[in-house]
Image (cartoon, grey):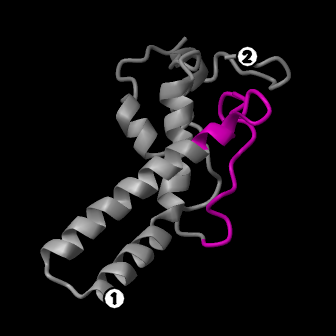
């Protein structure tokens, strides 16, 4: 049995898009910069076997979080643009381009936020990190 002398931080694991239980396995198999594959989500954690979408439609809630992220991004970029005395045409294009460019980040981090914050049953357990326990995915409720 390995001793978990330094557990990965929750914030660091969230930023790296790691599994909320073992904080080692990747939630997304592809890079955020992969235009065609940024939205692909692993069904199970490759390290501990946690089923990410533990019920049908679980990630639909991420749509609302993503909407909030996108709205915040547009407001921030809009305020920056207005404070720089840009023309309305330039302001609209700045907001539209920034919203489109930030879609992959909004998509991913809305799902990560759902996994870490809104699913309280998915807590870090060092036994899964070091491979002492592993779900088969058939009866994963946590």
Q: Residue at x 58, y 20 (%)?
A: 122
- Vertical placement of residue 34 versus 63, above or below: below
Residue topped by disc 2: 141
- Does residue 131 appear left or right of residue 80 in this picture? right
Residue 51 in magenta stretch: yes
Which of pointers 1 and 2 lies earlier in the amino acid sequence?
Answer: 1
The tag on residue 54 is none
Q: Badge 2 local density, few (<14 within 10 Å), some, or many (20+)?
A: few
In the image, 7 versus 41, the foreground residue is 41
State the extent of the magenta-drawn residues as a range: 35-62
- Vertical placement of residue 92 versus 75, above or below: below
- Residue 133 in view of the camera: yes
- Residue 26 in view of the camera: no
Where does the image place residue 81, in percent across and percent down from the top left?
22, 75
Q: Are marks 1 and 2 in contact (CB under 8 Å)?
A: no
Element on which disc 2 rests: loop
- Vertical placement of residue 129 versus 58, above or below: above
- Vertical placement of residue 28 versus 141, above or below: below
In the image, 141 versus 16, the foreground residue is 141
Which quadrant of the structure image shows residue 82?
bottom left
Which quadrant of the structure image shows residue 70?
bottom left
- Does residue 85 appear left or right of residue 56 in this picture? left
Q: Residue at x 69, y 55 (%)?
A: 40
Question: Which residue is at the far right?
Answer: 138
Q: Looking at the magenta stretch, what is its main secondary structure?
A: loop
Residue topped by disc 1: 89
């Amino acid at each position: 049995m390995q001793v978990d002398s330094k557990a990965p931080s929750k914030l660091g694991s969230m930023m790296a898009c790691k599994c909320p239980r073992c904080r080692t396995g990747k939630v997304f198999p592809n890079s955020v910069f992969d235009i065609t594959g940024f939205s692909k989500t692993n069904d199970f954690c490759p390290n501990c076997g946690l089923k990410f979408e533990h019920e049908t439609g679980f990630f639909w809630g991420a749509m609302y979080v993503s909407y909030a992220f996108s709205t915040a991004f547009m407001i921030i970029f809009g305020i920056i643009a207005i404070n720089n005395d840009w023309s309305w045409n330039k302001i609209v294009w700045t907001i539209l381009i920034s919203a489109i460019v930030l879609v992959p980040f909004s998509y991913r981090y809305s799902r990560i936020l759902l996994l870490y914050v809104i699913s309280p049953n998915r807590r870090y357990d060092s036994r899964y990190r070091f491979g002492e326990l592993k779900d088969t995915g058939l009866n994963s409720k946590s």
